[in-house]
């Protein structure tokens, strides 16, 4: 009997000690995390202040541009860490895992796109997260600490005139990120002529994938007052139009900025004709070549600006800003978790900025957990279906001008491909927006129709229409999905 009592007492004491230690560890961890959040918030405030001030000045120093890029990258990584620290406990308290388990169909997401970590937080996951957090915090601290000289030099850079949508994330009418790229483009356009008197034409290639924001960046910079005052006129041309102007025998006068978009490669003989025409412009004129074709960069006289897709941290930050709008994310911790998963899906699928805005526009229309989970599930299944059929993600199909299966989104067997630039079906076929189709599939017109993916709210105010047809209306022998013979993809 005494032995039994002793064993029970020992067990009770052991449990009590374990309980006290766990409570102390939790309390200590909570206090440490709270200090880390405060420290991170302070660093982000400093970083944001520097980046915003730099974005409002003309920077010509290449070293400063590199520093600005490094600081902005560390800043977005820091925002991702802050969200993890700030909303993690709220998400657990909100019982998000329980909600997710009740939506078992969403498991297709994990079959289509591998996630960085599983839902169940293990000890190993905690250590990895701790290392990631420490790394993000350390890189931001180093970046901010090394900016003293940058800030000093920044004070000597001329300030730009203020424009409403230059101020970051008040609305969705803004050009996100691209801080260093914008400065490089401005520096090229505003630099003075070669004092030696060399009349070589200055040509800058701007190269990037489909819908990464090339023309938006150009339009943004061309709206700058110093750029506008430097050139007598700014001319935007398509590659084919340039050859047409040559045939007409036209002459361009004055110091001009000519922006030429090439949808396909140009052979050297045609370029020689174009160059011989452009070089006759007045001294000081500049050329910007915009294309998704990397080989086009060979025509440049200066180092090209290469626009890549946003990093995961940048895209995560942008997507949340667009999806929540003016709503405070902290009020919807479950939605924050879904937004994180959504950002991971679209980044893994190399989705363009157009699609990012398109999906965020749908989510912002209804801040409901089940609605967001349903949309995420549809998108994940669409990605999985196209990967299974074609072996490539939908983004790659769109870039190649090939049709994409959107059955999972429309709840009807449909294929979609971008309208070519000169295809005038928009005024002929019935049209619906992507948001209308996703939120209420019954609005789908009978027969073929135009699906308006998204319309930009800032210059150049481009629309992104797509041609949609029923898969059941016939098949294309050269493709797994049907579609008209005309091919086209946005530059």
Image (tube, rainbow, N blue to C red):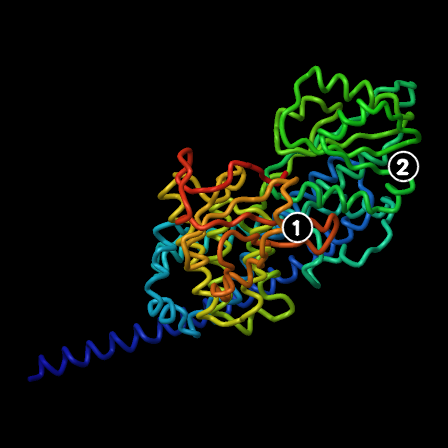
Judge by depth and name the residue closer to the eye, 249 or 235.
249
Judge by depth and name the residue closer to the eye, 268 or 207.
268
**Percent x, y of residue 234:** 84, 38
Q: Residues within 10 Å of mark 1 (few under 14, many from 20)?
A: few
**Percent x, y of residue 45:** 68, 60
Quarter of image, res 392: top left
Dot 2 lies on which element?
A: loop
Quadrant location, the N terminus: bottom left
Please give the label number shown on residue 370.
none
Q: Nearer the viewer, mark 1 or mark 2?
A: 1
Q: Is residue 230 above or below residue 173?
A: above
Q: Residue at x 49, y 39 (%)?
A: 402
* Residue on which the image places disc 2: 231
Quarter of image, res 126: bottom left
Q: Is residue 387 above or below residue 429?
A: above
Q: Residues within 10 Å of mark 2 (few under 14, many from 20)?
A: some
Q: Residue at x 69, y 38 (%)?
A: 66
Please give the label number shown on residue 463.
1
> Tags 1 and 2 in contact by the CB under 8 Å rule?
no
Can residue 36 be seen here? The reply is no
Marks 1 and 2, Cα distance to the nearest angstrom? 28 Å
Judge by depth and name the residue closer to the eye, 100 or 196.
100
Q: Is residue 452 above or below residue 362?
A: above
Indicate left or right for 437 with 168 as reference.
left
């Amino acid at each position: 009997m005494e032995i039994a009592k002793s064993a029970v007492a020992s067990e009770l004491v052991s449990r009590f000690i374990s309980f006290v230690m766990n409570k102390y560890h939790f309390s200590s961890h909570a206090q440490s995390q709270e200090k880390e959040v405060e420290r991170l918030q302070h660093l982000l405030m400093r970083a944001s202040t520097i980046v915003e001030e730099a974005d409002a000045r003309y920077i010509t120093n290449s070293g400063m541009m590199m520093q600005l890029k490094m600081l902005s990258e560390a800043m977005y990584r820091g925002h991702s860490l802050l969200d993890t620290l700030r909303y993690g406990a709220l998400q657990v308290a909100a019982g998000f895992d329980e909600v997710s388990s009740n939506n078992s169909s969403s498991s297709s997401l994990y079959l289509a796109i591998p996630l960085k970590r599983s839902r169940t937080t293990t000890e190993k996951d905690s250590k990895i997260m701790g290392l990631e957090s420490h790394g993000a915090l350390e890189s931001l601290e180093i970046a901010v600490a090394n900016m003293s000289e940058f800030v000093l030099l920044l004070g000597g850079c001329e300030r730009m005139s203020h424009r409403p949508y230059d101020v970051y994330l008040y609305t969705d009418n803004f050009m996100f990120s691209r801080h260093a790229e914008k400065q490089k483009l401005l520096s090229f356009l505003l630099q003075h002529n070669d004092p030696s008197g060399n009349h070589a034409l200055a040509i800058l290639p701007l190269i990037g994938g489909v819908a990464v924001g090339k023309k938006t960046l150009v339009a943004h910079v061309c709206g700058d007052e110093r750029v506008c005052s430097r050139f007598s006129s700014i001319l935007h041309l398509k590659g084919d139009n340039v050859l047409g102007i040559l045939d007409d025998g036209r002459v361009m006068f004055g110091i001009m900025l000519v922006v030429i978009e090439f949808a396909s490669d140009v052979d050297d003989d045609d370029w020689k004709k174009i160059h011989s025409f452009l070089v006759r412009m007045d001294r000081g004129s500049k050329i910007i070549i915009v294309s998704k074709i990397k080989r086009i960069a060979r025509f440049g006289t200066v180092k090209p600006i290469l626009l890549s897709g946003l990093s995961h941290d940048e895209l995560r930050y942008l997507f949340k800003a667009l999806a929540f709008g003016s709503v405070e994310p902290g009020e919807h911790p479950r939605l924050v978790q879904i937004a994180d998963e959504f950002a991971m899906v679209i980044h893994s699928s190399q989705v363009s900025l157009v699609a990012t805005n398109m999906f965020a526009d749908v989510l912002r229309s209804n801040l409901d957990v089940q609605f967001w989970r349903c949309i995420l599930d549809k998108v994940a299944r669409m990605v999985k279906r196209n990967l299974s059929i074609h072996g490539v993600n939908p983004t790659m199909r769109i870039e190649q001008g090939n049709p994409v299966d959107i059955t999972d989104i429309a709840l009807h067997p449909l294929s979609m491909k971008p309208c070519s630039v000169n295809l005038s079906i928009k005024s002929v076929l019935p049209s619906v927006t992507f948001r209308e189709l996703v939120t209420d599939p019954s609005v789908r017109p009978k027969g073929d129709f135009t699906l308006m993916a998204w319309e930009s709210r800032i210059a150049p105010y481009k629309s992104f229409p797509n041609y949609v047809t029923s898969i059941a209306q016939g098949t294309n022998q050269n493709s797994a999905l049907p579609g008209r013979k005309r091919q086209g993809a946005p530059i």
